[in-house]
Image: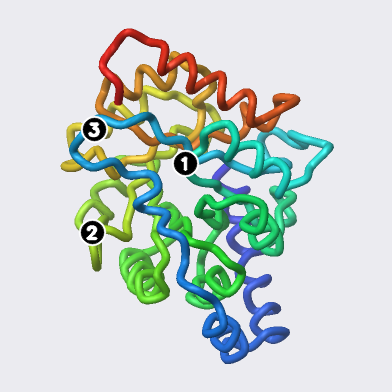
Amino acid sequence: MESVLEEIIARKRVEVEKARLVTPIESIKDRIAELGRPRNFFRAVVADRKPKNFRIIAEVKRKSPSAGIIREDFDPADIASRYHSGGAAAISCLTDRHYFGGDLGHILPIKDRMPLPVLRKDFIVDEYQVWESRAAGADAILLIAEVLSEAQIIDFQILATELGMTSLVEVHSIENLYRVLNHVGFPHSGYSLLGVNNRDLATMTTDLVHTFRMLDLIEDPRVLVSESGIRTCEDLRRLRDHGINIALVGEHLMREEDPGAALSAMLAGLEGDSGVPG
């Protein structure tokens, strides 16, 4: 799978160079100047010190390299609207076209249909994409530690903050967690989240316990997002019992006839639990 990831990144670099030729950075900056402020992604998903309900970042995704086609009847704006009705706190939108069936142009139609903030989920490898994300209406970006240097993560976070966007810094390996720990919350604490991807990119297997293995190293679990392999109310309950109250859920919901109703059922089961709410 490492070779597949390398293939994705190599292709992404080519895509960025082509995009830069078609749409120069100056025109992107002009477009951003005409936009209002981003929606506050960080505030939408992070609770204060008081107990609150579990927050789901619900993902809009047509396909993936591991699962193939996930949903044939793919209407991103309609799906996001259903997620909003089902209780999502924010939306994650896959924008990689070749491997995930996404498109950067999906973000604004999604935002036109519902009031939640939207994360651009893609393989960010160049500063150009940070500018591009904001111009496309994104309120947050994903920064994957497995494919970025520390310097890139810092630079991209600074630029995202200047543009009013939240950064979700994602790790899988313990080594990369150590690399980014001091950078989560940089340059300002209200603009940065830490994501733990439960999917092993080498084997494409998922294990929810992977998030729990990271917990002792994470000072503030309020900013921790558990990603991948979350399918049931019981999974949410296990996260909540470990002090984790944010999860990114995608493939499971996208396979349901009504993703919003499926999300609502997951959250209703959690709310019906007799334990202390998360």
**SS at circle 2:** helix
In the rendered image, the quadrant that contains the C terminus is top left
Mark 1 Cα within 10 Å, few/some/many (few <14, many 20+)? many
Provide the residue designation for mark 2.
189
Where is residue 131? Give x, y as percent: 52, 76
* Position in image of residue 152 (x %, y %): 38, 69
Q: Quadrant of residue 34?
A: bottom right
Q: Position of residue 150 (x, y in %)?
A: 31, 64
Quadrant in the rendering for residue 235 = top left
Q: Give me the C-alpha separation between circle 2 and circle 3.
A: 19 Å
Which mark, residue 215? 3
> Which residue type does callout 2 highlight?
Ser
Q: Residue furthest right?
A: 73
Q: Residue furthest bottom?
A: 26
Q: From what the image shows, is residue 103 above or below residue 227?
A: below
Q: How many marks?
A: 3
